[in-house]
Image (cartoon, rainbow, N blue to C red):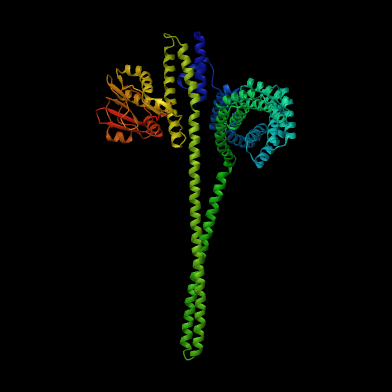
Amino acid sequence: MLTNHCILTRLMLFASITTALFLPTPTPFGAVLLHAQQSTLPTDTTTINRLNALAESYAAQGDDVKDTAFFYAKRAFSLAERIGYKRGMAEALATLAYRYNLDGKIEQGLEFGFKQLQLAEELGDKRLIARGLISIGFAAGQQSRADSAAIWDARARLLKALAISSELRDSLLITFCYNSLGRLSRMAGEQQSAQQYHEKALAIGEKLASLEQTSWALHSLAALDESQQRYTIALQRAVRSLALREQSKRTFAIATSLRLVGHIHLKMRNFSAAKRFAERSIGMSKSLDGLFLVKMQSYQLLADANTALKQPTEALSAFKSYTAIKDSAAAIEAKNNILQLQAHIDRERKDHEQSLLAREGALQKAVIERQYALGIFVIGCALLLSILVVILWRNNHHKKQQNEELSSAYREIRQQQEILESQAQEIELTNTQLQEINETLQASNIALDEANTFKLNMLSIAAHDLKNPLHTIANFAELLQEDASPNENSRTNEFAGRIVRICQRMLTLIHDLLETAAHDLGKMTLQNEPVNLSDLAIAVTEQYATQAQEKDQTIIVENQEECWVEGDVQRLYQVLDNLVSNAIKYSPFGKRIWLTLSIPANQGITRLSVKDEGPGMSDDDKSKAFVMFQRLSAEATGGESSTGIGLALVKQIVELHGGTISIVSEFGHGAEFIVELPCWAKL
C-alpha cells in the first residue's frame, strides 16, 4: 500500500498530464491540484518540445514501448498544428515516419516522410531535411519489388541526406544513410557497392554502440556473404545480428534475422535447424501488420526445409501459406506508390479540369464562329439572289445570256450547299467531342468518389488511434482507485470511478464505430469455426447476472441443448451481448427476460430468441430499430446510456453470417428479437 504522499503525487501527475495533453485549459479539478503543487503549466511550444523529446526517446527503444512513442508524437503534432508551430509538427512527423518504417508500414512511412520533408524545407532546417530524405529513401528500400526508377529516386534522396549529415557531422544519421544506400545497392544487384556501404555503417555503428545500426549492417553483410556462398562467416554475422536485435526488442528486425539464419542453415544442409528458425520467424512475424515479405520468405524456407526432411504434408501446408501471403503481399505493395503520387493528384486533376474547360470553351467559340459565318453566308446568298433577280428583270430580252447566267448562279448555289453540308458535318463532330468531354468529367467524378472512400479509411484509422489514450486514462484512474483507502480520499474514488466509466463508454462507442465502418467498407472479416450457441448464452447470462439482480430482474434460459452454427465466436457473442443488455436496460424492475434456443425441424436453421416484459415497440420504432444512430421512444429504466449503434451492428453481424434478425412486438407488451442462423453442417 502506497503512502498518502505517494497517492497525492500520482494524482497530481495524472491531473497535470490530462490537463496539458487533452484539454485546452485546466479543468477545475486539475487546477486545484496544480495550485497545490505550486506550479504553472509551461508555454505551448515548451509542452510540444517536451512531448517530441519523449516521443523520439521512446521511438528509439524496443517495440514494447512503441505505442507510447506514437501517443506522444501524435499529441505533439496535434498541439503544434493547432497553434501553427511548424518545427513541432515537423519533429513529430519525423518520429512517426521513423517508427512506421521500423514496423514495415511503408505506406504510412512515406506519407509522414513527405509531409515532414515539406515542412523541413519551409523551415530551412538541414537536420530535419536530412531526416525527411532518409525516411523516404529508407521506405523505398523496404519495397521488395521497387523498379529501377524508384531505386534511383530513393538513392538520390539518400545521397543528398548523406551530404547534409556529413556537413552537420551527425554520425548516427550518416550511419543510417550508409545502411539505406547499401540496401538499395543490393536491390539493384550492385554487390560491391553494397558491401562497402554496409562496412562503413558497421564501423561507425560499433563506435557509436548503436544496436540498431550495427545489427542492420551485420545482417546485410551476412546476406551478401550468403549470396557469395561464404556460409560460415555469413552464419557468424547473422547470429551476431540476431543477438543484437533481440536486445533492442525490434519485432520486425528479429523476425527478419531469424529467417536469414534459417536460410543459411538450409544452404549448409542443416535442415532441422533451418526448420526451427523458420518456425520462430513465422511466430514473430504473425504479429506484424506491415510488409509481408518476411512472412512469405519464412514460409518458403519452412517448405524447403520440410521437403529436405522428407515431410511432404508439412511442406505442402507451408507452401500453401507462402502462396496465400505472396498473393496478398503483391496487392498490398502495389498500393505503396499512391503516397508518392498523392502530392500530384490534386494539381493534375485541376490541370485536367482546366484543360477540359479550355477545350470546351474553344469548341463553343468555334461553334459560334461557324454559326456567324453561316449567317454571313445566308445573307450573302440572299444578296446574290437579289442581284440575279435584278439581272433577270433587266435582261429578260437576252434569253440565252439569261440562261447562262442562271446556270452559273445554280452552280454557285450548289457549291454553297456543299459548303453548308460540310459545315453541318463539322458541327456534328463538335457535338460528339462535347459528349466525350462530358464522359471524361463523369470519369473524374468517379475518381473523386474513390478519393472519398480513401478519406473514410483514414477516418476509421483516426478513430482507432483514440483507443490508446483512453486506455491510458482508464488505467491511471483504476490505479488511483486501488491506492486510495476506503475511508480516505472518497472524493478521489468518486472522480476516478467517473473517469473509468466515461472511458469505458467512449471505448465501446469507438469499437462500435470501427465495426460499422469496417462493414461499410466491406472489410469486416469473420474467423469462422463451429460455435455452440448454448455455451455463449450461458456465458452472457452469467456476465449480466449481477446487473439483472440490481434491477430485481430474472433471466431465464430455455432449451440449453447443443445448438451448433458455423461462425465467428467473438462476433456472435457481440450479438447476444447487445440483445441481452438491451433487454435489461429497457425492462422495468422485477420483470423477466427469456433467452430461448431452438432448432426447428427440417429447416436447417438455429433460432435464438431474446424476449422481455418491457414497454414494447411501436411500428415507427420497429422501422428504425436497425438504423445507425437512431434513438427509439423507449427510455432506459435505470438511467443507462445508449449510442444508437448496437442494434445496427447486430444486424450487420447476423447478415454477414448468412442469417436474419426480426422483431415481434406490440406497443406496451414487451419485445422479442429473433435471430435465425444456418446450422453447422457437420462433415
Q: Residue at x 49, y 18 (%)?
A: 476
Front one among 91 and 590: 590
Residue 430 visible: yes
Q: Residue at x 44, y 23 (%)?
A: 503
Q: Position of residue 420 (x, y in %)?
A: 50, 71
Front one among 110 and 371: 110
Q: Position of residue 221 (x, y in %)?
A: 71, 28
Asked if residue 349 lies left or right of residue 242, the reply is left
Q: Quadrant of residue 658?
A: top left
Q: Position of residue 474 (x, y in %)?
A: 47, 20
Q: Quadrant of residue 359?
A: bottom right
Asked if residue 644 lies left or right of residue 204, the reply is left
Front one among 395 and 261: 261
Q: Is residue 305 above or below residue 360?
A: above
Residue 289 visible: no
Front one among 308 and 39: 308
Looking at this view, name the residue that lies furthest to the front. Answer: 310
Q: Quadrant of the C terminus?
A: top left
Q: Position of residue 562 (x, y in %)?
A: 36, 23
Looking at this view, name the residue that lies furthest to the bottom. Answer: 397
Number of marks in picture: 0
Q: Is residue 341 above or below residue 209?
A: below
